[in-house]
Image (spheres, rainbow, N blue to C red):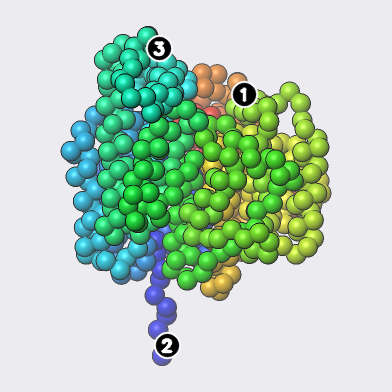
Amino acid sequence: MTSSPARRRIALLPLDDRPVNVLLPGDVAAVAGVTLDVPPQEILPDYRTAGDADALGAWLLERAADPETVHIVVSVDMLLYGGLIASRTSDDDTRAVLARLDTLREVHRRRPELPISAVSLVMRASNSYSAAEEPLYWTEHGKELHALGGDAHRLLGETEIIELGDLTAVPAEVVSDYSTRRLRNHIANLSTIGLVEDGTLDFLAITADDTAPFAAGSAEQVWMRHWMRMLPRGREVLMYPGADEVGAVLVARALAADAGVRPSFSVACATEEGMTRIPPYENMPLTASVSRQIRAAGATEVPEGGDVTLVMHAPDPDRHDMFRGRPDAVDEDAVAETIALVRARLDAGERVALADVRYPNGADEALVRALADEGLLGRLEAFGGWNTAGNTIGSVVAVAAAAVVGRASGTFDERAARIALLTRLLDDFAYQAVVRTDFGPSLFPDRFPMPDDARVAEAREVIHTELSALLEALLPDDGIKITELTLPWRRSFEIGLVLQ
């Protein structure tokens, strides 16, 4: 009698409880036919309520002890603070935070053969007056604190201490609190680099969201690059723009490592100049961030003939943001050029994944509608067009890489791949670019989390109806239905979708 093969499982400690950090990595694992374990909801964070850091550490040790677990993927922000928002708002001191890194050392001590991949974020400084994800003083001083970090960054290299007091009207006690939090998080990031050097971590990505070429976080990246250059294994650390997509990318990396498969990507863009643009909320040219996202997923970039052709729909030179609604004008030439490139590569027999980074916070509506009209949408290997360029690129690369791994291993799940593609089309295009634009002002008049359950239920019903209609219009008779729709943080910014 032949025994059934052992199950292969990956354990993920996600960045927070939102669907892109929990469901998207699960979709990636499912494409390759692998099970993803995540902590139970009761110990995860709930919006501004931090997760149970001690329980999360215990869960990680428990999963590491399971012989079916073949890889550990860890958000350091979840392990140390209890989630993304808690990393900005927690009052835990530096000593308490650093002690939680011992969980990773203990996992490595108990199972030194078990690979650990981790991501740690550079703390952002949102250029806004929204305290939805920040300390409460952001409502009064957010933009000034953002500017303060940029001014301090510009002074790097000065040999004298130059007062910044005249550059901001922020009270000293607020600057002290904010800067102390940044210092704590920066020390934690440096300590995590040390875990790469001593062999505890097999891979580390340090990523940054909502940043700018001159910002407090960009200055901290300069200091971290020093240690990445000095430490022999520090040179293996990847640092690039991103955040919410990294869990999915590292799950793809774990899949590739476990299967002994190294996916390859060829990158194509209809305009060569488009790859040199720095997308909004980021601090490096598109070509650099794409290369690092591919490497983070355990894949390689090749000039031609990759397992997947990654087509980039280049950033808008006018830097429009879909959160503000539709652009005033559509660049029909840019749309037509990307459509022609996608069609040519598909007709040549290539597997094509499309990263639509034209605008932050939603897909290019004209592009997706044209893809549907041309019958190209359903032929894509993967699609993304949400939030920042880094978010989009990473999610597209992760799904496409998982498909390569699955096909090479004989575990590819075509149904899961279809659901992963349609989930992003419904979220990034149908919801973010169309439904939120058309109905957002009436459904979410305050833009921030809604306390009223009746309003949440009304919004969910309208969104479900509109998305179902758009799904049928884009891909008629596809057989996929929306079985669950949630508003995880009770705001317009993200939805959760379950398809069947």
| Residue at the (27%, 66%) spot, across then down | 112
Q: CA distance from mark 1 to mark 3?
A: 29 Å
Residue 414 place in picture, x, y as percent: 61, 64
Q: Is residue 41 left or right of residue 500?
A: left
Front of the two marks 2 and 3: 3
Q: Is residue 404 left or right of residue 376?
A: left
Give the mark nearer the N terminus: 1 vs 3: 3
Say which quarter of the image contains residue 5: bottom left
Residue 248 place in picture, x, y as percent: 48, 51
Q: CA distance from mark 1 to mark 2?
A: 59 Å
Bin the neighbour count of mark 3 within 10 Å (Cα to Cα): few under 14, some 14-19, many 20 and up.
few
Which residue type does callout 1 highlight? Arg
Front of the two marks 1 and 3: 3
- Residue, disc 3: 167
Say which quarter of the image contains residue 239: top left
Bin the neighbour count of mark 2 within 10 Å (Cα to Cα): few under 14, some 14-19, many 20 and up.
few
Q: Is residue 243 left or right of residue 312?
A: left
From this view, report whether residue 183 is shown above or below residue 178: below
Q: Nearer the viewer, residue 144 or 90?
A: 144
Question: Contact (CB < 8 A) between labels 1 and 3?
Answer: no
Name the residue furthest front: 159
| Residue at the (22%, 64%) spot, across then down | 110
Circle 3 SS class: helix
- Residue, disc 1: 324
- Residue, disc 2: 2
Residue 486 place in picture, x, y as percent: 50, 38
| Residue at the (64%, 28%) spot, across then down | 319
Q: CA distance from mark 2 to mark 3?
A: 73 Å
Question: Contact (CB < 8 A) between labels 2 and 3?
Answer: no
